[in-house]
Image: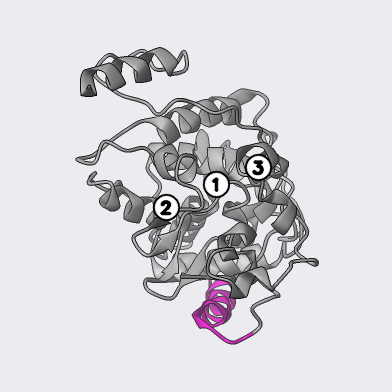
Amino acid sequence: MRNLIVVLGLLLAPAWADEPYKEYTPAEHFEPHVSGDSQLTGTYRYWKDPTKLDLRLAGHPDDSWKLNWKHLDYPFNKEMHAGHLALDRGLVLFNKLNRAGTFKNCLVMYRLNGQYETTLRGLRTHFPAYRTDLRRVAGLEEVIEHCAALESETLQNGSYDNSAVSIYIASQSLGMPIKIDVSSGPLREAWKRGERLFHQKVGRNNMSCASCHVGRVGQSLRATVVTSPYGDAAHYPVYRDRFGITSLHIRFAQCSLDLGFNALKPGSPAYTDVEVFLTALTNGYPVSVPSERP
C-alpha cells in the first residue's frame, strides 16, 4: 500500500519533482497574492479586512482558526506584551547603529539599481529583495546582520536583538501592504525554489510544509490548529508566548525539528527561498507588528 501511495505521489507531483529519491506533496496552484486563499481554505473572507474582523469567532475554539490568528495582530491586541518591549529595544539599537547614518543607507539600498531611498517607510513591504551588494536574494533580518557588521556590530540573524531591530523597521511600514514582485528575475527563481521546498517531504515523519498548511488546515496539531499559509508573513518577527520573539527563519527551524529534520541556520538559502514563497502569498496584506501568536 505504501508503495502505491509513493507512486501516486510521484505521478501527481509537479514537473519540478524529478529526483526519484525525494517525495513531494501534490502541488496546489498558489497565487502570489493574499487573495489566493479564497480558493485554498475559503477563510480569506473572515480576515481579509483587518478593520472588520468578526471577533466573535476569536472566542469560539472551533472557529477561531478561521481568522488566521489576525485577532492577535496589531492593533487588535492592544495589551502590552513582549513584542512591544522588543520594538522599544529595536529603536534603541537602530539609533546606536545609525549614529553616522550609514546603517540606514545600507538597509534601504534594496532596489536593483542600487539607489538609496530617503526613509524607512515602506522598506519592510519590499523584503525579501535582491541585494546587489550581496548578489543574492536576502530577507530583512539577513540584511540587518550584514549592515550591522559594516558598523562593527554583531546582530546575528535569528537573535533577539536582530529581530528587535527588524520589528522596529517593520513598524515604520505599519499598515502598508506587502508587495514583492515574483514575476521575473531572481525573485521568480527564489519563488519557484521556495514552492518546491514547501512541498518536499523531509524528516523521519516524511512530511512537507504543505502536509499541514494545505492538507490539515483547520485541524488540531500539537495543541495548535493549523491555519492558511496565506497572509502569514506580515506579522514577523512575532512574539510567541511559548518561545519569545521569533523571526520567520527561527519559525522554520522550529517546524523543521517538529518534522524530525535537522534545522538550518537562519539566513540559509533554503529558508530564504521559502520566505520568498510565503511572503508572496502575503502580497496585498498590511504589515502588522508587534503581533502575538501562541
| Element type at mark 3 | helix
Question: Does the magenta-highlighted stretch encompass residue 78?
Answer: no
Q: Nearer the viewer, residue 19 or 64?
A: 64
| Element type at mark 2 | helix
Q: Nearer the viewer, residue 267 or 2?
A: 2
Residue 223 falls left or right of residue 281: left
1 vs 2, front mark: 1
For disc 2, the neighbor class at 10 Å (few under 14, some 14 to 19, many from 20) is many
- Asked whether residue 145 appears in the rendered view, the answer is yes
Residue 287: image x %, image y %? 68, 59
Can you say whether 100 is above or below 122 in the image? below
What amino acid is found at the position of numbered circle 2 in the picture?
His
**Circle 1 residue:** 229
3 vs 2, front mark: 3
Residue 129: image x %, image y %? 60, 41
For disc 3, the neighbor class at 10 Å (few under 14, some 14 to 19, many from 20) is many
Q: Considering only order in the chain, which callout, 2 or 1, is on the residue closer to the N terminus?
A: 1
Q: Please, what is the dominant secondary structure of the magenta stretch?
A: helix
| Residue drawn at (36%, 20%) of the image | 9
Q: Considering only order in the chain, which callout, 2 or 3, is on the residue closer to the N terminus?
A: 3
What amino acid is found at the position of numbered circle 1 in the picture?
Pro
| Residue drawn at (27%, 14%) of the image | 20
| Residue drawn at (50%, 48%) of the image | 217
| Residue drawn at (57%, 80%) of the image | 84
**Circle 2 residue:** 249
Q: Tell me where the magenta segment starts and ends, as one range.
A: 79-98
**Circle 3 residue:** 37
Residue 93: image x %, image y %? 52, 75
